[in-house]
Amino acid sequence: MKYLAPSILSADFSRLYDEIKEVEEAGADIIHLDVMDGRYVPNITIGPPVIESLRSITHLPFDAHLMIVEPEKHIDAFIKAGVNMVSFHMDATIHAHRLVDYIKSNGVKAGVVLNPATPVNTLEEIIYYIDYVLIMSVNPGFGGQKFIPQTANKITKLKELISKVEREDILIEIDGGINEENISLLSNLGVNIFVAGNSIFKAKDKKEAVKKLKEKMKE
Ligand code: DX5
Ligand code: ZN
């Protein structure tokens, strides 16, 4: 399956209701929520209270991407806020397996994130337990950065690992610099979930941008 996940990091924060409704009506599949703490990454964004407020305005699944240190300390607040999927960076916690287990025991999908310089083989022991892998195709921290082409090599390596452990149900998500030019290629390589911030929320016509990206991700 293929899903388009607009990242509201690039939206107008004073108009989040309208921005989310607009992409929902255009056919967005998932809402991607970038959570940054100013420690794991240099930037600070939103947290559980904002997510909780947004929860009632849409039925779309919420995918929280936690760019925070010690995510285990805050996981209950995100679950309570109503996220459906939550991912954390492998090097942000000491006990990744315990955290994955905890997330899943609460009925939430658990994902782990690879930074551009983190190899796929770091997932060898956790892969059995997770629901999805998020490949960062930019360095985390900011929207609107340029796609790093070498990160696409990880998709094939990840697919190999997934088939080796016979967990073809694991979804592959990609995040950073996704646009109309690169989405088809990434889709052909096997990506399932495409995060897009600037290419949707900074577009002149957001609905048109969603439709174009969706068409191309299916090509
Ligand atoms: C970066 C975030 C991304 C980012 C995507 O740290 O994880 O989700 O906002 O935005 P674009 O598509 O503009 O790169
Ligand atoms: Zn993200």
Image: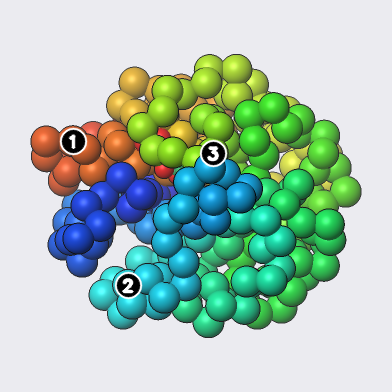
In the structure shown, which secondary structural element does the residue marked by tag 3 occupy?
A: loop
- Residue 74 percent coordinates (x, y): 62, 71
In the rendering, at what x and y percent does residue 118 appear?
73, 32
Reply above or below: 100 against 169: below
Determine the residue positioned at 41% across, 75% down: 49
Disc 2 and disc 1 in contact, CB within 8 angstroms: no
| Quarter in which the C terminus is drawn | top left
Report the Cα–Cα distance between label 1 and label 3: 21 Å
Amino acid type at circle 2 is: Leu
Q: Disc 1 marks which residue?
A: 203
Residue that appears at 46% across and 66% down: 47
Give the colour scheme of this rendering. rainbow
- Give x and y (percent) for residue 58: 29, 71
Residue wearing tag 2: 54
Residue 166 % position (x, y) = 79, 47
Q: Is mark 2 within 8 Å of ligand 2?
A: no
Q: How far apart are marks 3 and 2 (CA)?
A: 23 Å
Badge 3 amino acid:
Pro
Q: Nearer the viewer, mark 3 or mark 2?
A: 3
Q: In this view, does 123 lie to the left or right of 146?
A: right
Name which residue type carries label 1.
Ala
Residue at left 34%, top 41%? Answer: 197
Along the polypeptide, which appears first: circle 1 or circle 3? 3
- Can residue 40 be seen at all in this image of the molecule? yes
Q: In the image, is residue 139 above or below residue 84?
A: above
Going from the N terminus, do you reach mark 3 or mark 2 first? Answer: 2
Q: Residue 140 carries which label?
A: 3
Pick whichever, 166 or 133, lies toward us.
Answer: 133
Near-viewer residue (203 or 129): 203
